Amino acid sequence: MKRLILTSPSGLSLTRSGLAEVAITSGFRFVGGPLPPLGELETYFGLRSDQDPVGHWSHWSTRSQWPQDARARRDLALIEFCEPYEIVELWFDPDPNDQLQLIWLLDHFRAYPAMAAKLKLRLVAFALSTLHETWRGWNEVPLINIRPADLETASICWQAYRAATPEACFDALCRDLSGFPLLRPALLDLLQELPWSRSGLGATELRLLELIAAGFMGTNGLFYLRGFGQRAVFTDMEIGTLLQGLAHGPQPAIAGLDDELRVIAPENLRARMEAYRRSRLSLTEFGEAVLAHKEDFSRHNPIDRWWGGTHLTNDNLWRWSPTLVKH
């Protein structure tokens, strides 16, 4: 049986495990910044162009491991590439960005009912990045069919996340999401990253303040030691950006973050990581007050970040209470 896997970058090892002859991933991140423009997302799904080969779906996959007939079809649109396969399995783990990639793909497949009928979802309740290439436990991962109603639900949730306010995404929590058991917790995690009503900070920002108050002076623990209760919404560099927002505003909540981070280019990851490692963090008096919910961070500092399609600013500040409130 010819089997294709659509997955996140964490799932590339599934090809090496022998489960499928081809695994295709996407390098897009849908959290931690503005959403990719629609043109970029359409380029990913379409025919490969010599003008923009990097944006095409085939660029994100390990083509050297593909069988020859698959490599010969790498310039096709994704739907056309999928046609010869009897089953197209979707492997996305509980990470919120994985779940967003899942509903984004299903939103695209919804327009192709014949191809959508081949889709099956693996309920991956673990981090795909932890898999070793010798892993053979795929029969232990539940496999369920994707129904037309599930495609509609996925599309509604994806469009809700793309909307200019988080209201539709909040409303999606009341929908029947039983076809995607991992989606509701992911959406809830994302909504909790909106500024909280009593502090003006999202859940991860508050957790960073808690850890620093508990004695985590270095950034290494804040980036990597998930066992200490850090949330799993953001990558290490995205957590670094959150730290900068907490440390480099007019009224900082954190002291000790290396000042060179103000001028190091975002793409210079090595220099930025060295600056993070030099940092020795502590809470300011204001940070202690924010952590105690006695001060509101957003009333003293500019807010300028993205939550899905929502541009959060001081004048457009949607808060989590744990109900949704606009101030």
Image (cartoon, rainbow, N blue to C red):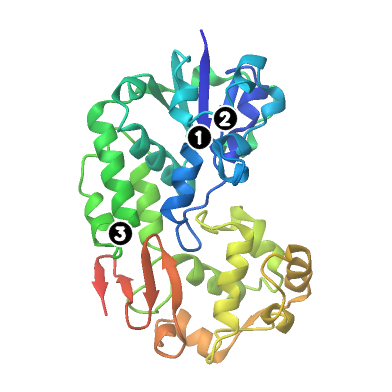
Q: Quadrant of residue 298?
A: bottom left
| Foreground pick, 46 / 319 | 46
Task: Say which residue label 3 marks.
Answer: 163
Q: CA distance from mark 3 to mark 2?
A: 32 Å
Dot 3 lies on which element?
loop
| Foreground pick, 225 / 245 | 245
User: Which residue is pictured at 47% across the width and 22% down the height?
Assistant: 82
Question: x and y percent of residue 140 in the render?
Answer: 50, 20
Q: Residues within 10 Å of mark 2 (few under 14, many from 20)?
A: many
Where residue 75 is drawn, which disc sits there? Answer: 2
Question: x and y percent of residue 324 in the render?
Answer: 25, 67
Outermost residue toward the top in this view: 1
Where residue 6 is drawn, which disc sits there? Answer: none
Q: Nearer the viewer, mark 1 or mark 3?
A: 1
Q: Amino acid at mark 3?
A: Ala
User: Which residue is pictured at 66% across the width and 16% down the height?
Assistant: 67
Dot 1 lies on which element?
loop
Q: Amino acid at mark 1?
A: Leu
Q: CA distance from mark 1 to mark 3?
A: 27 Å
Task: Say which residue label 1 marks.
Answer: 47
Query: Are discs 1 and 2 less than 8 Å apart at CB?
Result: yes
Question: x and y percent of residue 276 in the render?
Answer: 72, 71
Q: Nearer the viewer, mark 3 or mark 2?
A: 2
Dot 2 lies on which element?
loop
